[in-house]
Image (cartoon, rainbow, N blue to C red):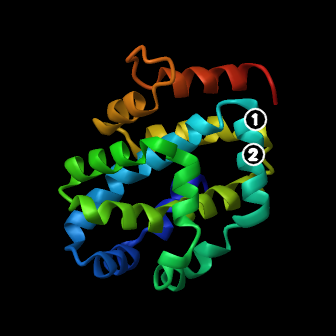
């Protein structure tokens, strides 16, 4: 099963219902917010793994802390998400851009701004778990991660206006070009080093 398949399975109706209860929102809004947040998380990870050093450090984080076992008990993790690794992961993925990402997810989904942070803290370890499991199952090296994440970002964000927002938030060269920083670096990685 590929990365987006694992995420779909992990974020099933039961999970959405649990997340809604933790956030105190209705399931429709929660579902919309998850749909908005996933491409942002995947795209942020793709952006980070687009450099050789970033890909190596992501692979090392997966090896150390994210073997996919979280997917075997998503409910158990959600019950205790606040003490989980979510905040640390978000700091690595978005750095100083986290506020802008939260605002975009809130605007796109209608989820209250104060609840987007907790939602991302729940989603980030699940995404890392799915990525870790995919990496192990497929025997992926550091050079494969950017391509995997880039493809998953496009799948998760198909038709989403947020990919444009994401690219402006993460736009390293400030040329305003949509996803070129992510896609261009992915192309460079896939074309050269393995």
Name the outermost residue toward the front: 96
53 sits left or right of 4 in the view: right
66 sits left or right of 80 in the view: right
- Seen from the viewer's position, the closer of residues 120 and 34 is 120
Q: Is residue 161 above or below residue 114?
A: above
Q: Say which element carries label 2.
A: helix
Q: Is residue 160 above or below residue 110?
A: above
Q: Position of residue 67 (x, y in %)?
A: 72, 66
The part of the image, by quadrant, that contains residue 100 is top left
Residue at position x 69%, y 62% in the image = 133
Q: Which residue is mark 2?
A: 57
Residue at position x 80%, y 43% in the image = 141
Q: Is residue 31 above or below residue 101?
A: below
Placement of the C terminus among the 4 image quadrants: top right
Q: Position of residue 126 (x, y in %)?
A: 54, 65
- Seen from the viewer's position, the closer of residues 14 and 94 is 94
Rendered image: mark on residue 21: none
The part of the image, by quadrant, that contains residue 165 is top left
Residue 6 visible, this orientation: no
Name the outermost residue toward the top: 175
Residue 168 visible, this orientation: yes
Q: Is residue 46 above or below residue 66?
A: above
Marks 1 and 2 close (CB-CB < 8 Å): yes
Q: How many marks?
A: 2
Disc 1/disc 2 C-alpha distance (Å): 6 Å
70 sits left or right of 190 in the view: left
Q: Say which element carries label 1.
A: helix
Q: Which residue is mark 1?
A: 53
Q: Position of residue 168 (x, y in %)?
A: 38, 28
Within 10 angstroms of label 2, few (less than 14), some, or many (20 or more) residues? some
170 sits left or right of 53 in the view: left
Residue at position x 42%, y 60% in the image = 120
């Amino acid at each position: 099963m590929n990365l987006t398949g694992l995420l779909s399975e992990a974020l099933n109706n039961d999970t959405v219902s649990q997340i809604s209860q933790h956030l105190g929102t209705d399931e429709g809004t929660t579902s919309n917010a998850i749909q908005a947040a996933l491409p942002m998380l995947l795209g942020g990870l793709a952006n980070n793994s687009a450099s050789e050093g970033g890909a190596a450090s992501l692979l090392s984080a997966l090896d150390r802390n994210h073997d996919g076992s979280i997917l075997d008990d998503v409910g158990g993790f959600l019950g205790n998400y606040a003490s989980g690794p979510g905040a640390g992961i978000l700091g690595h993925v978005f750095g100083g851009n986290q506020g802008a990402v939260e605002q975009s997810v809130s605007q796109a989904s209608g989820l209250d701004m104060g609840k987007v942070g907790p939602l991302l803290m729940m989603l980030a370890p699940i995404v890392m778990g799915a990525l870790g499991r995919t990496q192990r199952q497929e025997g992926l090296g550091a050079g494969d991660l950017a391509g995997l994440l880039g493809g998953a970002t496009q799948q998760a964000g198909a038709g989403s206006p947020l990919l444009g927002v994401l690219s402006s938030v993460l736009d390293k060269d400030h040329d305003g070009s949509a996803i070129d920083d992510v896609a261009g670096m992915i192309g460079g990685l896939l074309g050269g080093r393995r």
